[in-house]
Image (tube, rainbow, N blue to C red):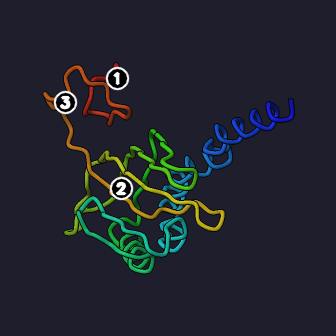
Amino acid sequence: MKNLMAGFLLLLLATTSGAQSKADEEAVRNLPRAFCEAWAKHDGHQLAKIMAEDVDFVTVATTYLHGRSDFEKFHVRLLSGRFKESVNTPLQTTVRFLRPDMTVVHWSWKIEGDKNPDGTPRQPRYGMMTMVAQKRSGTWLVVVAQNTNAILGLPPELQDIKTPIAIPGTAPESR
């Protein structure tokens, strides 16, 4: 009986050890909200706090930033310059845990109020960001991210494919 009970406990531990806690799931789901809250304050310093020291970040303009310091410097300049009146809103988020301490977060966004490099206003835009986050010393930090502008219109290749996150104006409304 002892062996049966010990075996059951080992099986229970083995099957639950990879399970994610609700706190971890919520912390990871909060990364897009934290990103947009810092953006709303136009605070590049606060924005950098969710990034790992060794983050690799690719902007929508395909600028590749390595390290929190360069990420912070870039976003302080951006958010005090032509993006100082912009609002970035998270729309939908999906989370996929790769390991108990690593996850992929895809989230769609809408931005409005920003300006082109020549100072002319931009039309509101939509896009999607992919973040890889890792739990380090008890805190979820973004280690890799890629931000992408959406191209509006329904691509013919998307027919009969249901996308997990549809960007407004890029997929049928029923999706």
- Quarter of the picture containing the C terminus is top left
| Residue 108, image x, y percentages | 39, 43
- Please tell me whether residue 174 is drawn above or below residue 113 in the rendered image: above
At label 1, the amino acid type is Arg
Q: Nearer the viewer, residue 154 or 158?
A: 158
Q: Residue furthest right?
A: 2
Q: Residue at x 19, y 30 (%)?
A: 154
- For residue 154, the mark is 3
Give the label, 1 or 2, closer to the camera.
Answer: 1
Q: Nearer the viewer, residue 120 or 9?
A: 9
Label 1 sits on residue: 175
| N-terminal label among 1 and 2 | 2
| Residue 158, image x, y percentages | 20, 28
* Quadrant in which residue 74 is drawn: bottom left
| N-terminal label among 3 and 1 | 3
- Quarter of the picture containing the N terminus is top right
Q: Nearer the viewer, residue 103 or 29?
A: 103
Asked whether, in this view, residue 24 is left or right of residue 149, the answer is right
Secondary structure found at label 3 = loop
* Quadrant in which residue 63 is drawn: bottom left
Asked whether, in this view, residue 143 is left or right of residue 81, the answer is right
- For residue 113, the mark is 2
Measured Cα–Cα span from mark 1 to mark 2: 28 Å
Q: Residue at x 58, y 60 (%)?
A: 135
Q: Residues within 10 Å of mark 3 (few under 14, many from 20)?
A: few
| Residue 174, image x, y percentages | 34, 19
Q: Residues within 10 Å of mark 1 (few under 14, many from 20)?
A: few
Give the label, 3 or 2, closer to the camera.
Answer: 3
Measured Cα–Cα span from mark 3 to mark 2: 25 Å
